[in-house]
Image: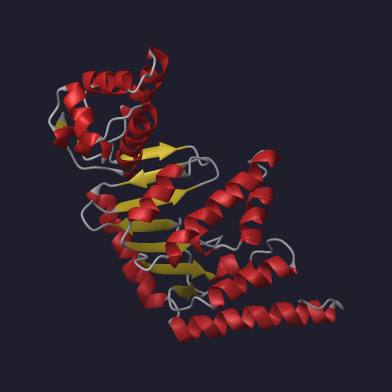
Amino acid sequence: MTAIISTPYSRELGDELRRLRESCTEFNGRSMAVQLGWDPSKVSDIELGKVRASAVDLVQYLATCGKDIDFIDEFRIRYHNAFDLYFAQVPDNVRTLAMTEAKATKITSYDILTIHGLMQTEGYARQLFVDSYVEAPEEIETLVQARIDRQTIMRRHNRPECSFYVHELALRMQLGDAQVREDQYLRLLFNTHIVRVVPAHVSAFRSAATLYEFGKAAPVVYTETDTAQVYAQDSVAVARTRRLFQRLDAVALDAEQSKRKLAEYVSGLREDCHDLGTDLA
């Protein structure tokens, strides 16, 4: 068992081991350690994703949970890259992202063409999945609910410190009908204490990025496309992302200016709908 810097994926897989122990055995952490002949801290550290378990450790642990060789082999394959400082996942794997957000003490994001998932309304999220043509129609509602469930961290008493930089291009996207867009504008408007608009005249940076910071774990940079979620914990990637947000802090509108800008979009949308003879509720 080797101590190493934990990653979002190692913490997720460690938590999966904990859930297997709790659902498949009657052991708590200490009695599991006794069963395996381990020091109690070893069970805790593996389940927290703080250390890399050896192949033998995993076989012993999972066999004690009653898992067969096929399950053990599949888990070992996933676990092999759990501590990589750069790793990618398929976009419908929301558990790693949700755990990362839930454990973060600070979240800073920059989005160019869409609103950040933690700030999306349900209608906006649904329209994003519908318009992507990537997700199977029968899976869309499950994905929408998972995105909305992630937002519960924003209602915690100890929620993370958040800053959401949104490029004006995202506000101009014709996503959904007028009601979907108005609801999304209003969500941002009512949260301008944590939302800052990057004006349209500012040249867009090349890609969206989110920086997650933690009380004890190393910071993580996250970005996503329609085909992959990418996590980077390398110090160079983190430093580059910090410089990005320093630049954005200098060029983005402040809270009051962002509020006025978002109000303009709401007013403009309502005027357009009035001209078309359609009143928004």
Q: Is residue 132 above or below residue 89?
A: below
- Quadrant in which the C terminus is drawn: bottom right
Q: Is residue 109 above or below residue 49?
A: below
**Residue at the left extreme, as displayed:** 39
- Quadrant in which the N terminus is drawn: top left
Q: Nearer the viewer, residue 39 or 274?
A: 39
**Residue at the front extreme, as displayed:** 26
**Residue at the top extreme, as displayed:** 69
Q: Is residue 146 above or below residue 151?
A: above
Q: How is the image coloured?
A: secondary structure
Q: Position of residue 198 (x, y in %)?
A: 48, 73
Q: Position of residue 208 (x, y in %)?
A: 45, 57
Residue 135 found in image quarter: top right
Q: Is residue 113 left or right of 94 when viewed as pictured?
A: right
Q: Is residue 248 left or right of 148 when viewed as pictured?
A: left
Q: Nearer the viewer, residue 67 or 219?
A: 67
Q: How many marks?
A: 0
Q: Nearer the viewer, residue 276 or 206?
A: 276
Residue at the image position 34 percent from the left and 35 percent from the top? 13
Q: Position of residue 47 (x, y in %)?
A: 27, 37
Residue at the image position 51 percent from the left and 75 percent from the top? 199
- Would you say residue 205 is visible in this rendering? no
Residue at the image position 35 percent from the left and 70 percent from the top? 247
Q: Is residue 178 above or below residue 86?
A: below
**Residue at the right extreme, as displayed:** 277
Q: Is residue 241 left or right of 174 when viewed as pictured?
A: left
